[in-house]
Every structure is written in structure tokens, then in C-alpha cells.
Image (cartoon, grey):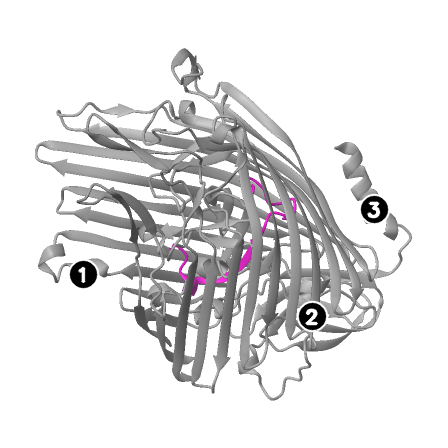
Amino acid sequence: MKKIILFILITTFGFNVFAQNKYTISGYVKDAGNGEELIGATIYIKEIQKGTITNAYGFYSLTVPEGDYTIQYSYMGYNMLEFNINLNESKTKNVELLETSQQLEEIVVTAKKADHNIKSTEIGAFKISPKEISTVPVLFGEQDLLKTLQLMPGIKSAGEGNSGYTVRGGNTDQNLILLDEATVYSASHLLGFFSVFNSDAIKDMKMIKGGGPAEYGGRLASVLDIQMKEGNMKEYDVSGGLGLISSRLTVEGPIVKDKGSFIISGRRTYLDLFLKLTEDYDDVTLYFYDLNLKANYRINDKNRLYISGYFGRDIFSFEDMMGIDWGNSTGTIRWNHLFNDRLFLNSSLIFSNYDYDINSDIGDNELTITSGINDIDLKEDFTFFINPQHTLKFGGKFTYHTYVPGEVSGNENFDSFDQDKDYGYEAAAYISHQWNLNDKLKFEYGLRYSMFMATGPGDVYSFDKDGDVIDTTIYQSNEIIKTYGGFEPRFNATYLIDDISSLKLSYSRNRQYIHQVSNSTSGTPMDAWIPTSNIVEPGISDQVSLGYFRNFLDNQIETSIEVYYKGMQNQIDYENGADLFLNPYIESQLVFGKGRSYGAEFLLKKNTGKFTGWLSYTYSRTEKQFDDINDGDWYPTKYDRKHDISLVGMYQINPKWNLSASWVYYTGNAVTFPSGKYEIEGQTVNYYTERNGYRMPDYHRLDIGATYIKQKKKGREASWNFSLYNAYGRENAYTITFQENDEGSTEAVQLSLFRWIPSITYNFKF
């Protein structure tokens, strides 16, 4: 480790030992309309053809030799600004950019080349803007970040209408989802038909498909990093939308103009109100709500404070006899400190909680079941902007996990019991270096070390080969049960073939210390989360990917081809006939093996003009191997699909009307169906042979939408959005079950959820 750090320091500082008269220009890039910092804005010096981008807080820093320069500031969807500057001392330059539609006559702008996808070291990573999310037609007409993500290559939907997703062969639990740095463990409302992310509160989103930089870790498949809006620093705004089954409202404005701001954004469905209008369902309650809160304040030029939170809950009950509610709560306190014009620090204290409650009240029997997981994180991230060729990032994170596998309480007719809580300490440290070697070759490499300690108090069991308890060890509070850890190297390289094409290579290793055990493809709110233990080892993945990127028509059209291979160790599955729900001996029901995933991803995307959109295609295979399943042979996972196609188009007819459409096709998921049946004491029993040896029918669907902008002037906006989900009425299979008919024969019965779902939403802002 010391040698690696020494090498990084030599390469970063060694080139500048004899440099003289270098000065730094730094500052923040903001939206001129609301004062929000812009993430990933480009700062470029024409004379020396060097540049940088703003970080997650809109800050940039460039250190160059003394001289007269022309500096360009640009961001997708905004007008580019150009300034002449005499850099004879270090200077601070804060810039505000105007959206294209807000261009003022006195601002002189030039065209911006959108070639970040070609020149950056990122591979297997992309962003989707809130504007793109707002125009893609989805189920129930609700703007949905996760469902829009599923239209990109390498990301697969977990099921019909579901916001759950899998990435490059990973399970759904192998996706790290961050909301203002807080982990969101369950990202779905209403059993997956909505995501927990209210698009009105989202500022920026970045998806990384496995090859992420060293500051990210803890999951094997992907990272989805979401930043909430900070609120308008200049004036008060109220916006929202009224839909058929849900409505939302957002209020934002300055605490002190240009120094601090706040945003409050809420959403609620009212399907339960419609159900109460019918006699058959007037005792049914079914809805969800969520609330996003954020405030920030600029203490001075070097210090800024952020406080944000998310609260969401799903409620379902039937005749006061049975009910279930589940949800997430997160809270983040962040402090940004600028030591000088090149060294930036972000400190974060983070809280995350997910839990569910099941209540039953039938006759004299009352029962309540509670389960969940709590995290407390402390995180430190440093960024050192050395010069345009070198940027150094380093830091660490510490997490205290508390797992609540199950607490059961009831009246005198039930015996209450609590499963032992599980506790663990997770820690990581990292260092990463971005190195622009020359005009052709760029690197980003780093090293992360992570570790996990499973601790007491609690009872730890040992099992025989039949799953019976043979020994119990009692551990006291904070006593270490088992420790795991290891290095996680990361490496990305970009070679610029010419101004419009590049070749990229990536390798990454990841470790995961928490696992979700489920026998459902898309997951349910009651799935069990279990930590690494004396029996369950951390999952490990190694991924190699290679990509070719090329732009056409002055960067109006992006294309890319990426191929990847990922090997996975210590994978978890359940044995045949496993009992996973509230089982204190759940580890005896698990089997352990390995996995592999490989594929190719193609993307064609048009970013500008009246007609925009993209075409994505993914070919992939995902398989696992367990000694105790399928006779030890490799078998496809339940989310294995060979082909996945998405076609998305958006067309602006005129300033008032926009049209959009999306079409998806994918081969059916692998599934375990009975291969035969036999009879025991007059009861028919299905006979199963191989795990996931059959396929669901192929899936395809067309969604269409239209937006009418009624008013857009003087800060006031009003629009109507119309959409039709499953426009040609395809009856796609949600489940297939087998049952006996009156003649004693077994027949397959297909359940289809949605045929035609029209939606209408009124959106407003003033």
C-alpha cells in the first residue's frame, strides 16, 4: 500500500517540481435562473487546450502557467459563456449559465461540443437528465427515474411495470442506490410499480455499471448516485402535478438570497380514495407517500452546510384484519470546506433506515411482525486539484449496521419472540488518481480497502449437513465474531483515436458485505437482509470491460459498443424447499457458489434537434453454479435474458406540443416450472427437475405520450401530459401457474397485469 501511494505521489507531483509562476482559477458554476450548482459543467482553456469539470458540488479548480487566456464555461442544455482573463495571480471566478431557452440578447454564446462521452475516462457510466425523464411515457403517467434507467443498455427491468432492475448479471440487492449519499435499501412503492424518487426533487443522477472509481464500494453490480435539488436561491417557486392516481407539490426558495435555500417536495397516491367509492373495496386502504426535504447555507466563501432528508411509506390494509406498511427514512448532514483554491473536502454524517410492519387482527388474535435495517455513516472525501493533468481523490467511510431480522409480538393468544439482532462495522479507505498523460491517453486508477466486522451481542449457530443446529456460541456486545476484508483495485483508461472516437478499458474489483435473500424475481418488501457472518462470506466480483465510442454530425449523435465479462465469488442462493421468512436459522437454508456474466451493449443516441432519443440493445448471459443445485451444473439465473431492446423517441412539433414513444422487447426470464407430476395419498405433487430450466414468453410493449404546454412565460408554466401504457394491448405474462382442470389434467394459467393504461397529468409552476 505504501509503495502504491508513493507511486501516485511521484506521478502527480513529479511533473511539476520545476514549474514556475503557475496560478489557479477556481470557483463554482451555477444555474443563472435558480442559483443551483451545476454538476459536471465543463471549463476549458482554448490556448492550451486543457480543461476540467465541476464536482458534485459545482466546484472547479484549474492550475496553469501565468498568461492571457480565453476560458469557456459550458453545460448540456445551457448557453456557453466565454471570458478573457489575465492570469497573473490565483483568482476566483464564479459563473452563472443560462438555459438555452432563457438566452438574453446581451450574452454572446458559441456552440458547445458535447464530447464528454469520448474524452472522459468513464466506461459503463452515464447520466440521464430530469428533462429526459419528464418526457418518457411510463406506467400511470408518473415520471419515474428507475423506469427510464431500464431503457438504457445493460440495465434490465425486474418485471412488468416494476421499478426494480438488474445490472450486468447482478442481483437486485447488488445495486447500491444513494440519495444524497444515504443508502436506499428499498427503492419501490406499491410492490414495485412506482419508484421512491420524486422527479421534482431530483437534480442529478449518475449510473455506474460496475467499473466505478475508488470512492464507491459495497455492491457488486452498480452504483446509482442521485443528488437532490438544493432549492432556488433567487426567488420562491411552487410547482407540482395532478394525476389520475397521484399528485405532487414542491415549494422552494431562498433562506437568504444567494446565500441559502430550501426545497420541500411531497407526493401521495389516492388510489384508496377511489376504492372507498365502491362497496366491494370500501374497507381496503392502499396508498403511498413520500417527502423530500433539503436546505443549504453558504457560511462564507470556504464553508457551506447542507441538510437533507427523505421519508417514504407504503400503507396497505384490509378490513382492519390485516395490514402491512414499509418504507425508508434517510438523513444527511454535509459540510463542504475549501482549504484553498485546490483542496476541497466534503464531510458527511448519514442515517439510513428501512423497515416493514405486518399487522394481523382476526377475532381475538392480534399479531405484529417487525423487521428492518439501520445504518449510521461517517464519510470524508478529499479532492486535490493539482493541475489540469492530475487530480487526486482520497478519503474514507465508516458504517455501523444494525439488522433486525424479525420481532414478533401479540396478545395472550400468541407467544412473542425476537430474533437476535445482527450488528456489524464496515469501513473503507481509498485513493484515486486522474491522470491526463497527453492529448491522446488518460487514466483513472485507484485502490480501495474495505473490511467488515460482524459483532455481538448474539448467538451464533453451527449446522450439520442436514441443516440441524449442532453448536451455539454466545457473543457479548461488540465482541468480534468474524472479520473480512481486502483490496479493491480500480483502473480505467481512455485512448483518443481522433477528435470523434475513443477506445476505453476498465477493470474493477468489488466486495459486498450485505445480502438480500429472496425467491422472487423482483423482490418484495418482506425479503430478508442478512449480513456477512461466520458462515456467509462477502460476495466478490471482478469485471473487465472494453468500449468503443464514436460521435457523428458534430457530436449530435453518440454511439458506443461495450463488451464485458464479470466473475463472481461467494454467491448466495436458497436450497430447494427453503423457508426464508422469519427463520432464525436462515443460514442453514442457504447454499454458496459462483457466478459469471458476459455480454455486449450497444447505444445510438441523438441529443439535439427537434427529434431526440436513443436505441439500445443488450446481448447478455448470466449463470451460476452451486454444488447443491442442478447437480452442480451451471444454470441461468432467473434474470438471465439473451436479448433486450429499447427504442425511445421524442419529437417537438412546435413550442406547445411534444410527442414521445418508447418500445421495449426482451426475451423471457428463466423460470423453474414443473417437469411432471405424481400423486401421493390422493394429492397431486409437482415434480421439478432443473433450476430455471424453462423460459417465460418473450415480452414487448409500446408506450406513447404527448405533452401540451399551455403556458410558459415570466416564471409561470402549465402543461398537460397524456400517455398510454401498452398501446397495442399486448397481454404480457406476469406469472404462469399450473393447476388441475375439471378433467384432472394440468394446465398452465397466465396472469397478465396491464393491457391499456391511459393517464393524464396536469403540471404547473409559478
CA neighbours of label 3 inside 10 A, class few (<14), some (14 to 19), many (20+): some
**Relative to 238, is 589 above or below?**
above
CA neighbours of label 2 inside 10 A, class few (<14), some (14 to 19), many (20+): many
Task: Evaluate whether residue 434 shows in this view.
Answer: no
Disc 1 marks a residue whose amino acid type is Leu
Marked residue nearer the N-terminal end (2 or 3): 3
Q: Which mark is residue 273?
A: 1
Task: Evaluate whether residue 698 shows in this view.
Answer: yes
**Disc 3 to disc 1, C-alpha distance:** 64 Å
The residues colored magenta run: 195-221
Q: Which mark is residue 11?
A: 3
Quadrant for the C terminus, please.
bottom left
Disc 3 marks a residue whose amino acid type is Thr
Closest to the observer, 598 or 757 = 598
Kindly indicate whether the residue at mark 1 contacts the one at mark 3 (C-beta within 8 angstroms).
Answer: no
Residue lying at 81% horizontally and 62% vertically, measured from the top left: 64
Q: Is residue 218 magenta?
A: yes
The number of discs equals 3
**Relative to 393, is 109 above or below?**
below
Camera-nearest label, 1 or 2: 2
Q: Which mark is residue 551?
A: 2
